[in-house]
Image: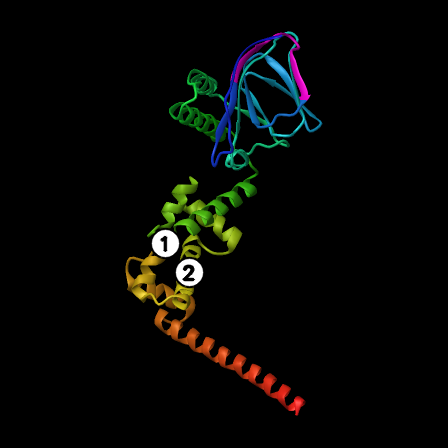
């Protein structure tokens, strides 16, 4: 038996996150659930007492300050301690962003356990969700907001990957940021601030992973995009410079020369000349083929 206060909400396929259910349980000794499946992601957090959680053939002994994830469709079991049964909160959620956020936090069926010292704050999030339980756009937005805060607190304390893996994550996120924002006049400091590390550490990670600096990568990516525009559009050099994040055309031209070995204007002429020659050669081959076919028919 358990004393539980739980709520379930109507859910639909969401483009972001949606709260499916939440609650707080004070369990009796040896109270258990499962083995069973959950349809959504469910995170439990232990406020007091002890218990055991099992998933993927592994058992985890948990106590206050510990939490566990049950991914959708994975068989799980959990049971309260005989002498010190646990009290826990939980929140179930789904949505197109759910998997991405869980992976970002570093949780999975293979690594389902986390620790947090934010017991009061986590409880406050779930309590607020339960207090705003009626169907309305305002309450739905509030519950999702509380869920995001709940996940952010877990992420802040539990993003614990191996140092190399963490470095690769920083580089990947930096690259994603550059690819999404190269057309703005961003600087390397903006990239470092986004991934929450200092510029010198970002520099060393890029050198190790890509054998180039973040500035070199940013410049190279911008110039690659500029080269595409030079060949596929009739935009002026000034417009292309602005389109790839350079406010000053002369700075863009200098960067372009350093990477491509010629000015943007010369590059456009040269590549179009090459393309024209390639087209002529291709047409010549077709004409020869057709001519050869005519000779065979005579």
Number of marks present in the image shown: 2
Q: 43 or 21: nearer the eye?
A: 21
Rendered view: 275 above or below 101: below
Q: CA distance from mark 1 to mark 2?
A: 9 Å
Q: Position of residue 200 (x, y in %)?
A: 42, 47
Q: Quadrant of residue 112?
A: top right
- Residue drawn where x is 31% and y is 62% of the image: 239
Q: Position of residue 71 (x, y in %)?
A: 60, 29
Give the colour scheme of this rendering.
rainbow
What is the number of the mark on residue 225?
A: 2
Rendered view: 117 above or below 48: below
Magenta highlight range: 23-35
- Tell me if mark 1 has few (under 14), some (14-19) or many (20+) residues whose alpha carbon lies within 10 angstroms of its own: some
What is the number of the mark on residue 260?
A: none
Q: Position of residue 145 (x, y in %)?
A: 42, 27
- Residue drawn where x is 35% and y is 67% of the image: 234
| Mark 1 residue element | loop
Q: 85 or 139: nearer the eye?
A: 139
Rendered view: 65 above or below 248: above
Q: Which is more N-terminal, label 2 or label 1? A: 1
Q: Return the residue at label 1.
A: 183
Rendered view: 44 above or below 256: above
Q: Quadrant of residue 115?
A: top right
Most extreme residue toward the front is 298
Q: Position of residue 128 (x, y in %)?
A: 42, 18
Main SS type for the magenta part?
strand
Most extreme residue toward the right is 57
Q: Is residue 197 visible?
A: no
């Amino acid at each position: 038996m358990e004393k539980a206060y739980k709520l379930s909400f109507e859910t639909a396929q969401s483009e972001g996150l949606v709260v499916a259910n939440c609650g707080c349980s004070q369990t009796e000794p040896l109270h258990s659930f499962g083995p069973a499946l959950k349809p959504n992601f469910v995170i439990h957090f232990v406020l007091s007492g002890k218990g055991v959680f099992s998933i993927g053939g592994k058992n985890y002994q948990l106590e206050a300050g510990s939490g566990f994830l049950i991914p959708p469709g994975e068989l799980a079991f959990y049971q309260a301690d005989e002498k010190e049964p646990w009290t826990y909160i939980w929140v179930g959620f789904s949505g197109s962003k759910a998997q991405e956020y869980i992976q970002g936090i570093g949780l999975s069926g293979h690594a389902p356990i986390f620790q947090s010292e934010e017991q009061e704050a986590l409880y406050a999030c779930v309590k607020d969700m339960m207090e705003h339980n009626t169907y309305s756009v305002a309450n739905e937005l509030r519950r999702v907001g509380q869920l995001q805060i709940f996940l952010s607190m877990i992420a802040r304390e539990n993003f614990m990957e191996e140092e190399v893996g963490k470095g690769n994550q920083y580089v990947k996120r930096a690259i994603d940021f550059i690819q999404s924002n190269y057309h703005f006049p961003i600087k390397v400091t903006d990239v470092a601030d986004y991934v929450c590390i200092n510029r010198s550490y970002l520099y060393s990670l890029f050198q190790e992973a890509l054998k180039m600096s973040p500035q070199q990568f940013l410049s190279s990516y911008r110039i690659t995009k500029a080269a595409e525009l030079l060949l596929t559009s009739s935009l002026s050099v000034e417009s292309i410079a602005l389109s790839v994040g350079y406010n000053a055309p002369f700075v863009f031209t200098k960067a372009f020369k350093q990477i491509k070995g010629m000015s943007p204007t010369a590059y456009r002429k040269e590549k179009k000349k090459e393309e024209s020659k390639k087209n002529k050669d291709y047409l010549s081959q077709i004409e020869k083929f057709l001519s050869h076919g005519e000779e065979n028919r005579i």
